[in-house]
Image (cartoon, rainbow, N blue to C red):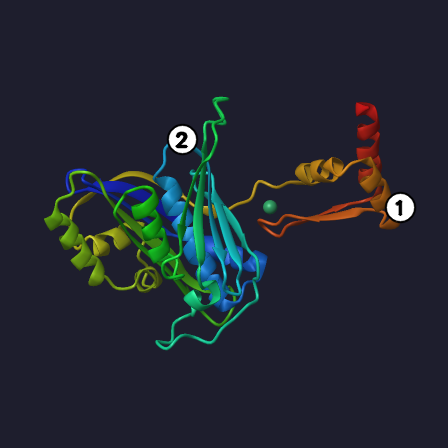
């Protein structure tokens, strides 16, 4: 099944609803970063939350969600372009803790206290680059979904329900299900409607149970909204995707300057560049470094 995100409205436009299945996104993220099970659970929630949050903004160039944690994972970062591509990394991919009392991944244990920051950039394409919008809130639970909801309520003043889930398995590709739901109350949502949604969400099976049973994003919303009609306004495929390339790796080496490039050529006969976002490795050989030196000379 292809990963997909849908968004729409319900209750006469007074709530905005989004849902995403991100099993493939997380499978690729886990493969690239070799994250431990608990880190995979945390990372998957952040990747899904970032895709859902990014989809709520129009004309987005880039939205970055950054968790700076006092727990052993230290940081989790995800970035989306708003059109379905997401990439990300964690600081300490291999940390692990025993499951918490209820047998669930101890995500709050590896995250701990900290902050959730959202950096939103728009306007590059029209040449109207503006300062990015930055919002930051303390983590309220370290379980990620509650932290996204708190961010939306506090920083964007949008009361929201956020459900994010990851289900793992013991054998490759390790990810059995990943996805999430975001419901935003817009001005005009009545108290009755809000409590109706709260009740239906409480009675909804866990998102990963639904996805593992074959539900797509529409199925997630049907359950979460408890039968309330909704209109789908947009849908997009989502994927873990990075915009790094061999050309960019060369540009980064070149930016280190002539002396550094000369010493790499002399001492290592080449350079190895690894993209932090996707762990892709680019090997520059002696000819590549000589070509970079030639270009640096030509610029002088
Ligand atoms: Zn990359």
| Residue drawn at (19%, 56%) of the image | 198
Horizontal and vertical percent position of residue 140 = 36, 58
Tag 1 residue: 266
Q: Is residue 66 visible?
A: yes
Q: Quadrant of the C terminus?
A: top right
Q: In the visual, does 201 lie left or right of 131?
A: left
| Residue drawn at (78%, 47%) of the image | 271
Horizontal and vertical percent position of residue 48 = 40, 52
Q: Residue furthest right?
A: 266
Q: Residue furthest top?
A: 127
**Label 1 vs label 2: CA separation?**
46 Å
| Residue drawn at (32%, 52%) of the image | 150
Horizontal and vertical percent position of residue 160 = 27, 49
The answer to which of 238 and 142 lies nearer the viewer is 142
Q: Label 1 neighbourhood size at 10 Å, few (<14), some (14-19), many (20+)?
A: few
Tag 2 residue: 59
Q: Label 2 neighbourhood size at 10 Å, few (<14), some (14-19), many (20+)?
A: some
The answer to whether residue 256 is above or below residue 191 is: above
The answer to which of 74 and 34 lies nearer the viewer is 74
Mark closest to the chain's N terminus, 1 or 2: 2
Q: Secondary structure at mark 2?
A: loop
User: Does the beta carbon at disc 2 come under 8 Å from ligand 1?
Assistant: no
Q: In the visual, does 97 lie left or right of 92?
A: left
Cβ atoms at labels 1 and 2 below 8 Å apart: no
Horizontal and vertical percent position of residue 35 = 54, 63
Q: Secondary structure at mark 1?
A: helix
């Amino acid at each position: 099944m292809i990963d997909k995100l849908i968004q729409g409205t319900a209750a006469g436009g007074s709530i905005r609803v989004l849902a995403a299945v991100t099993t493939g996104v997380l499978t690729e993220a886990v493969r690239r970063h070799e994250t431990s099970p608990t880190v995979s659970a945390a990372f998957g929630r952040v990747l899904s939350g970032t895709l859902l949050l990014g989809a709520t903004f129009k004309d987005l160039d880039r939205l970055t969600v950054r968790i700076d944690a006092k727990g052993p994972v230290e940081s989790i970062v995800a970035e989306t372009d708003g059109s379905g591509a997401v990439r990300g990394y964690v600081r300490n991919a291999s940390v692990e803790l025993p499951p918490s009392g209820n047998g669930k991944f101890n995500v709050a244990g590896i995250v701990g206290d900290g902050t959730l920051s959202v950096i939103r950039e728009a306007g590059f394409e029209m040449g109207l680059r503006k300062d990015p919008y930055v919002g930051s809130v303390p983590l309220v639970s370290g379980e990620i979904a509650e932290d996204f909801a708190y961010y939306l309520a506090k920083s964007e003043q949008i009361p929201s329900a956020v459900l994010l889930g990851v289900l793992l398995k013991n054998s490759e590709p390790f990810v059995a299900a990943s996805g999430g739901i975001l419901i935003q109350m817009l001005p005009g949502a009545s108290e009755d409607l809000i409590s109706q949604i709260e009740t239906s969400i409480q009675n909804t099976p866990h998102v990963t149970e639904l996805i593992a049973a074959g539900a797509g994003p529409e199925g997630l919303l049907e359950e979460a909204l408890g039968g309330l009609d909704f209109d789908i306004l947009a849908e997009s495929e989502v994927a873990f995707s990075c915009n790094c390339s061999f050309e960019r790796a060369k540009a980064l080496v070149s930016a280190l300057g002539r002396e550094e490039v000369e010493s790499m050529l002399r001492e290592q006969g080449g350079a190895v560049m690894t993209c932090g976002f996707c762990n892709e490795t680019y090997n520059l050989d002696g000819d590549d470094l000589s070509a970079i030196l030639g270009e640096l000379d030509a610029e002088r």
